[in-house]
Image (tube, helix red, strand yellow):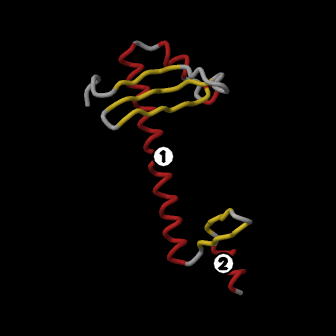
């Protein structure tokens, strides 16, 4: 991967409720992505902004890649949880008026329901 393959920018969002936030914007062949975080939760924000451009890119890309990897892991874990619940028959549906609520019951909840 080269420096030119991804466009990475560091910006401050301007929308309502975005005070104190910092964003890493990434654009590449796969699309556009935004990673927003509160500056207070990431104390390196001021250090990141003080770095030269190439080092900013490298650090911002690393942070973005790590967040993306964590997100993918979380999605995979949730998919596994739902798949196991389907096999065990622990997916429950509840209706309230016109709304339906679908959820995964725990093993202990199923044991109480079956007993």
Are circles 2 and 1 on residues that touch, CB within 8 Å?
no
Q: Left or right: where does residue 87 sit relative to residue 65?
A: right
Nearest to the observer: residue 53 or residue 86: 86
Q: Hey, which residue is sitting farthest front in the picture?
A: 98
Snapshot quadrant of residue 13: top right
Snapshot quadrant of residue 85: bottom right
Q: Left or right: where does residue 15 sit relative to residue 115?
A: left
Nearest to the observer: residue 51 or residue 82: 82
Q: Left or right: where does residue 95 sit relative to residue 49?
A: right
Q: Is residue 103 above or below residue 75?
A: below
The image shows residue 60 at horizontal and vertical percentages of: 43, 26
Element at badge 2? Answer: helix
The image shows residue 5 at horizontal and vertical percentages of: 28, 27
Dot 1 surroundings within 10 Å: few (below 14), some, or many (20 or more)? few
Residue to which mark 2 is pinned: 110
The residue under the point 52% across, 59% down is 78
Dot 2 surroundings within 10 Å: few (below 14), some, or many (20 or more)? some
Q: Hey, which residue is sitting farthest bottom in the picture?
A: 115
Nearest to the observer: residue 43 or residue 25: 25
**Which mark is drawn over residue 62?**
none
The residue under the point 40% across, 12% down is 52
Residue to which mark 1 is pinned: 71
Element at badge 1? Answer: helix
The image shows residue 101 at horizontal and vertical percentages of: 66, 64
Q: Left or right: where does residue 10 sit relative to residue 54?
A: right
Nearest to the observer: residue 13 or residue 44: 13
Q: Which quarter of the rendered picture does the C terminus lie within? A: bottom right
The image shows residue 48 at horizontal and vertical percentages of: 49, 19
The residue under the point 56% across, 78% down is 89
The residue under the point 56% across, 24% down is 22
Q: Which quarter of the rendered picture does the N terminus lie within? A: top left
């Amino acid at each position: 991967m080269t420096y030119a393959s991804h466009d990475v920018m560091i910006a401050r969002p301007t929308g309502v409720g975005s005070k104190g936030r910092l964003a890493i914007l990434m654009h590449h062949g796969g699309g556009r992505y935004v990673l927003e975080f509160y500056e207070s939760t990431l104390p390196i924000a001021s250090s990141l902004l003080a770095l030269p451009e190439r080092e900013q890119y490298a650090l911002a890309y690393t942070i973005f890649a790590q967040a993306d990897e964590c997100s993918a892991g979380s999605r995979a874990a949730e998919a596994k949880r739902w798949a196991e619940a389907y096999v065990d028959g622990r997916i429950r549906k509840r209706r309230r008026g016109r709304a339906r609520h679908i959820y995964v019951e725990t093993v202990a909840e199923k044991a109480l329901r079956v007993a």
